[in-house]
Structure formats: C-alpha cells, structure tokens
C-alpha cells in the first residue's frame, strides 16, 4: 500500500466539494467491468469527438448551408464520397461496439465521517466542518488535507469495511489529526482500490491550524507497519539502505507499460561502462566507452547527461552511476571535453525491451510489435490521406471562410476515422497486450505477466527435477479440467484456472491485474485472488477457495501443525501449501531467489 498527499493551493481549497467527491456514487470516471479493465479506446475520446464534437460538426455544416451554389459545389467536390463513407464506417463501429452495457455506475464502495459532532450524518458533518474552518480567519494557508491510500489488487480479499476504518484511524493518529474532523471514502473506479481521506486542519475546539510536519516519513512508516500487521502486499517505501531507485517518471513508465525506461537502461550499462573506464586516460576514451553502449555523454547546465545515440531519450549521467557525475569524472580526466573524433559503432542500443523474464516472452513480444506496427501504419495512412486533402484545399480558389470551415470538417472526419481504426485494431501498451491475451486463454501471457514479480532461480538438477514434477502435475490437472463435459466451450477457451473456477462457482467473474494476478468475484460477493504462488480469499469465500486450491494444485493430504496452529496441505508432487492461522491465504513456499548482493559478488568473482 502507498499513501500520497494531494496538494491544493489555498485559493482552490474547498472542503465541501472534496467531501462530495469522496462520497460520489455516480461520477464521470466510471469503472469498467471485468472484460474491459484494460485499455479501451472508447474511454479516451478526443476533445473533438463525442457530444461536443457532433455539435461542432453540426454548426460547421449549418454555416456551409448558407453558402452559394458554387461554394456548395466546391465543398461537395472536396469532401468526396469516400470521406462520407469514412464517417459512416466510424458510426457503424461505434454502434456495433457497445461498451455501455459493461460500464458500472458505482464509484464509491463506502463512505463515512469521523471526529464530528454530527455523528454519522455525512452531509451535516460537511456543514459542521465548513463552519469550523470559517471561524479561523488568521491563516492564509489551505485548511484541508487531502490524502489517498492505494492498495494492490491482490489485497482486495483482505480488506473489509472494519479494516478500512482501522487504517484511517491509524493514519489520523500518526499525523496528529485524531481529534480533527474528517470525511473518508473507498473508491473502486480504478484497478487499484483506494481510500480518500479529507482532514480538516483546523482543530474543532482550539480553532488553530495544525500542519503535519514531515508527514511523508510518518505515512511511509505506518504503511510498512500495516502491511506486516495485516498481511498486505509490501511496497518498497523509503528505505535508505537500499540502492537509489529510478526517477519518478522512469519508474512510472516501467510500472504502467512493463517496458524498460531509458534511465533503467543507462543504469544497467553504468556498471559495465565504469569497468571500461578503469583503463581510460582521456575524455575521448570516455566518449568511446559510452558510444559502444549506444550512449552519448554531453554537458548540460551544471552537470552531464547521457543521450541515446539513436533517439531523443536523455537522462542524468549520475543516474546511470554515481561515479559518472561531472565532478568525479573531471577529478580523473580534467576539465570536460566534448567528443571530436568519429565514434565507433554501437554494440548495444536502447530498445525499450520488456522487463519480464519468462522464457515465452520473446514470441509474445514479437506478436505485440507486429500488432503495434500494423496499427501504426494504419493510423499513419489515415493521417497522410487527410493531410493531402488539406494541402489540396489550400490551393483551391474558394472563399477564405469556406476554406476555414472545410479545414474544421476535415479534422473532424480525420479524428472520427482514427477513432474507428483504433477501436477495430485494439491496442494499449505491452502490459495491456499481455492482459488481453491472458483473458483470451493464453497461459504463456499470464506467466509472462507474473514473471516480473518472481526472480529466476538457478538451474540446479534438483530444481529441474522439482520443476518437471510440478509441470507434470499441472498438465494432469489441465487435462482433467478440459475433459470435464459440464464445461461450456467458452470456458474451455479461457485460462485453465478460470475454467476451473467456472466449474466450482457458476457466474463468477474474473479480471487480470497488470502483475498477473487473477481476481475472482463470486456471485455471493466474496473474492478470491490467485497470484500463482498464493491464493487469498475473503472469509465468506473460504469454501470455494479451498476447493479451487485443492483442484488446481492437486492436494493429497491435510495436517495440522500443533506448534503454530497452521494447516499444512501436501501436494501430489510432495510440495507443501500453508494456511497460516488467522490469515485467509493459501501460500506455497517461495522459490529459490538470487539475492542482488550475492549475485553481484558472484559476478565480481567471475570477473577476477
């Protein structure tokens, strides 16, 4: 879980508006259903489309209706039949692809208020806070503290209404705002369930403004405590001991696309470049070392940056390695000198490669690139066609007003045709592609999604033997599921785990997160989350989760560990599955992992 304060300028501070937003049950940002959780072009309508775009087109056509017959003939000859056909095709795609039935109107799962004299009356408590803030006329700063606490999709089965309120109270205590009024709500309109909290910074009795000092440290510390206490997914946090992480934009790019950022690539090459610089004597040697890895070293401002030789990507040199800063390089090679010689050909180059480590990744990556290039060429052809029409329009002997309105219409038609092409081709980034393929029933795509979470284990003979046994058990369970006659054809074409859930709980819905977790929602309201190595569940879904786990992992026997109180399930292959006492989760022991420090030491020993 992570927490973040949303800053607000004093002139924009409005507690009542924020509290209304937190409790909003119907909002424009509606949540998509199971099948439409990933990229949907219908949700990303351009400014010139939709109701406003149709109105703009109608106004433009009304203006054209007032022109003379000669002007109308010019318009008709320019906007040929194929343009109007493109509009009809766009309308047909929009009509045939009906996403409205998959849209859920709910956004707020629950809301409540605390610390107010109004009790549980949410609306009355808002007026109480407004009156309290109005009594403080001295402060010129904002009087509202807006915070978001976001949870992983894998935690949905563990989060209950009571736990949300406990988490909110713990944050209020950590920030020193436990005596203050606050309005809270849990939103489900994004992939990550999150909680909004609006704190009134004006003390209800003292009427003084309280500013939480260094709140980000307190919030981060509390997040780590709550994760361990309630068994939630543990985020990295602000650990000073670990090595410096990627910058904000680079980390966001990798998290949302599943592809390596340029800063990440530069960091991977930093160690190798630093080793090559041990024999360097001049700045030309430094530039050649960077060039062999597809990088350029340039001066910018008071420091150095590394630039992609084959693109426009740029990152700070110190982000690649702290020993590559301007100060440390000038201490070794003197004042900075730009490259003057012809650089050698690059042995490596940045290509935004996928971050996943699964062996099936390359084939899926090629399919994604082919799909991306087909979509790109299709969209480029549409843009080129309308660019030529606009160029032709510039040379036509027509009135300036007619030309202006025709330009607007061409852009409108181009936007509609591009929108129709995007809807037909599908799309999204690498993670969206994997999730779409996994939803269609591709087990390899689901394995690739999960491979970013699990590190590759060493290929020892014992490990290979265990993996072969597990693979045999998996194939046996897959065959058993597919041979069931009571499963529909649609269920057999889905993931085996989804087909298994269909046989256990008819009517259950499923969605796949960008981390490869399959989250099931049962008709009774319970939830089950399958991450591949663990299966967590809400209390009311325990019976279904137990049957699902037993069938998927081939449970042979069950025993009770009297010392710890844990329930131990033994699989056919001999592996163990643990159900910890007081925790709603079935968990398999972690595979052998390669620790970063041990791996680094091993590489250094090999280098010697």
Image (spheres, rainbow, N blue to C red):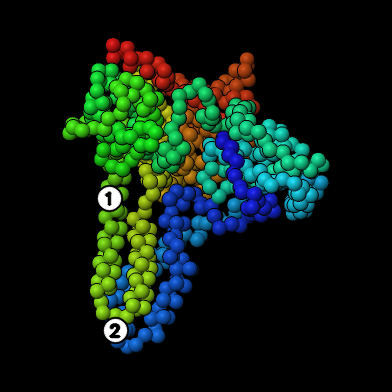
**Residue 114 appearing in the image:** no
Q: Tell me which label, 1 or 2, sits earlier in the chain.
A: 2
Task: Report the front residue among 312 and 49.
Answer: 312
Q: Nearer the viewer, mark 1 or mark 2?
A: 2
Is 258 situated left or right of 165 in this image? left
Q: Secondary structure at mark 1?
A: helix
Where's residue 463, x and y in %? Answer: 37, 19
Task: Report the front residue among 406 and 169.
Answer: 406
Taking the spot 64% from the left edge, 49% from the top edge, the residue there is 10
Q: What numbered label is drawn on residue 281? A: none
Task: Report the front residue among 575 and 601.
Answer: 601
Taking the spot 27% from the left edge, 53% from the top edge, the residue there is 374
- The quadrant where residue 453 appears: top left
Badge 2 is on which residue?
73
Q: Residues within 10 Å of mark 2 (few under 14, many from 20)?
A: few
Split into 4 quadrants, where in the image is the C terminus? top left
- The quadrant where residue 54 appears: bottom left
Q: CA distance from mark 1 to mark 2?
A: 39 Å
Q: Residues within 10 Å of mark 1 (few under 14, many from 20)?
A: few
Q: Secondary structure at mark 2?
A: helix
Q: Is residue 598 above or below residue 542?
A: above
Task: Report the front residue among 186 and 479.
Answer: 186
Residue placed farthest to the front in the image? 335
Badge 1 is on which residue?
373
């Amino acid at each position: 879980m992570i927490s973040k304060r949303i800053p607000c300028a004093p002139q924009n501070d409005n507690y009542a508006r924020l509290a209304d937003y937190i409790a909003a049950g119907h909002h424009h940002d509606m949540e998509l259903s199971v099948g439409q959780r990933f990229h949907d072009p219908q949700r990303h309508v351009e400014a010139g489309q939709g109701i406003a775009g149709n109105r703009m087109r109608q106004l433009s056509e009304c203006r054209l209706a007032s022109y003379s017959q000669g002007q109308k003939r010019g318009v008709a000859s320019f906007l040929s039949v194929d343009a109007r056909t493109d509009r009809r095709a766009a309308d047909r795609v929009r009509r045939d692809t009906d996403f409205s039935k998959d849209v859920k109107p709910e956004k707020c799962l629950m809301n409540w208020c605390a610390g107010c004299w109004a009790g549980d009356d949410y609306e009355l408590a808002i007026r109480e806070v407004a009156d309290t803030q109005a009594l403080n006329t001295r402060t010129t700063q904002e009087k509202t503290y807006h915070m978001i606490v976001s949870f992983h999709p894998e935690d949905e089965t563990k989060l209950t209404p009571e736990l949300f309120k406990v988490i909110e109270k713990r944050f209020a205590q950590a920030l020193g705002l436990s005596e203050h009024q606050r309005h809270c709500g849990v939103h489900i309109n994004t992939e990550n369930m999150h909680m909004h909290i609006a704190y009134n910074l004006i003390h209800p009795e003292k009427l003084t403004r309280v500013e939480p000092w260094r709140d980000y440290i307190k919030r981060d510390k509390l997040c780590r405590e709550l994760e361990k206490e309630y068994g939630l997914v543990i985020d990295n946090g602000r650990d000073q001991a670990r090595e410096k992480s990627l910058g904000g934009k680079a980390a966001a790019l990798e998290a949302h696309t599943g592809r390596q950022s340029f800063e990440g690539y530069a960091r991977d090459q930093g160690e190798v470049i630093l080793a090559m610089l041990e024999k360097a004597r001049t700045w030309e040697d430094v530039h050649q070392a960077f060039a062999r890895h597809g990088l350029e070293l340039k001066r910018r401002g008071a420091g150095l940056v590394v630039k992609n030789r084959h693109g426009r990507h740029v990152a700070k040199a110190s982000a690649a390695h702290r020993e590559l800063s301007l100060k440390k390089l000038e201490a070794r090679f003197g004042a900075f000198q730009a490259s003057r010689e012809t650089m050698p050909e690059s042995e490596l180059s940045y290509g935004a490669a996928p971050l996943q480590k699964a062996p099936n990744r390359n084939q899926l990556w090629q399919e994604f690139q082919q799909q991306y290039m087909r979509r790109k060429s299709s969209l480029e052809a549409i843009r080129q066609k309308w660019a030529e029409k606009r160029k032709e329009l510039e040379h036509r002997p027509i009135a300036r007003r007619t030309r202006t309105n025709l330009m607007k219409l061409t852009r409108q038609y181009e936007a509609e045709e591009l929108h129709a092409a995007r809807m037909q081709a599908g799309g999204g980034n690498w993670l969206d592609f994997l999730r779409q393929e996994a939803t269609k029933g591709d087990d390899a795509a689901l394995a690739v999604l999960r491979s970013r979470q699990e590190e590759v284990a060493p290929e020892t003979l014992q490990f290979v033997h265990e993996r072969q046994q597990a693979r045999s058990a998996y194939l046996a369970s897959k065959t058993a599921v597919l041979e069931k006659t009571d499963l529909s054809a649609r269920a057999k074409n889905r993931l085996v785990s989804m087909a298994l859930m269909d046989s256990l709980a008819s009517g259950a819905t499923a969605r796949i997160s960008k981390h490869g977790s399959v989250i099931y929602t049962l008709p009774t309201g319970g939830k089950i989350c399958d991450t591949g190595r663990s299966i967590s569940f809400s209390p009311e879904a325990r019976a279904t989760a137990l049957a699902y786990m037993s069938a998927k992992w081939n449970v042979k026997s069950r025993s009770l560990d009297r010392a710890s109180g844990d329930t131990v399930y033994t699989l056919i292959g001999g592996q163990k599955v643990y159900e910890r006492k007081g925790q709603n989760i079935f968990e398999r022991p972690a595979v052998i992992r390669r620790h970063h420090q041990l791996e680094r030491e091993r590489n250094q020993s090999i280098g010697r």
